[in-house]
Amino acid sequence: MNFRPRAREELDLNLIPLIDVVFMLLIFFMLTTTFVRDTALKVDLPLAKSGQVEQAQQVNMLEISRDGVYALNGQLLESSQLVKALRDVHDPEATLLILADSNAQHQKVITAMDAAREVGITRLSLGTLPPR
């Protein structure tokens, strides 16, 4: 029997490949993640020079397309269903963000605002884009 101690190989932990892989994963997730809310309708927002970004905790999005189609939080609605749908999502702390297409009929926006008032929504915002 050989009881002489063997020379142990030193373990070397190379962290550079690990850091490279983690960095590549970070870049991948940053590029594939979207930070913009998805909308149900194609809406081209009007431009406005003034305005401010509202930091609301809860936001219900009401979209109005060029053709006058409504979508509340991604669900398509008929004009007759607007008041009932707003009543279902009504929360006194929530803000209703109206995203109306710049070419939508003004009457459709007024109808949406009137439905919000009928339900009792007091926090209302209109979505715009800054000029280019």
Image: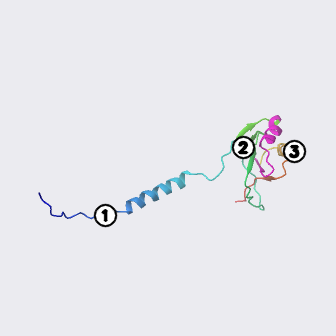
Crowding at dot 1, Cα within 10 Å, few <14 / some 14-19 / many 20+, comes out as few
Task: Point out the stretch of residues depicted in magenta.
Answer: 80-101
Percent x, y of residue 74 = 70, 41
Instruction: Judge depth for marks 1 and 3 and give the one in front.
Output: 1
Look at label 3 and name its amino acid: Asp
Residue lying farthest left? 1
Left or right of 18 in this view: 72: right
Amino acid type indicated by mark 1: Asp
Asked where in the image residue 9 lies, by quadrant, the reply is bottom left
Question: Count of labels shown?
Answer: 3
Give left or right: position of 123 versus 39.
Answer: right
**Measuring 84% from the left and 45% from the top, which residue is drawn there?**
116
Q: Position of residue 30 (x, y in %)?
A: 54, 55
Give the CA distance from mark 3 to mark 2: 18 Å
Give x and y (percent) for residue 45: 74, 51
Q: Name the residue that disc number 1 marks.
A: 12
Q: Which residue is mark 2?
A: 73
Q: Is residue 96 above or below residue 48?
A: above
Query: Which type of secondary structure does the marked residue at label 1 adopt?
Result: loop
Q: Of the residues shown, which amino acid type is indicated by label 2? A: Asn
**Closest to the observer: 48 or 53?**
53
Would residue 90 be counted in the magenta stretch? yes
Cα separation, mark 1 vs mark 3, equals 70 Å
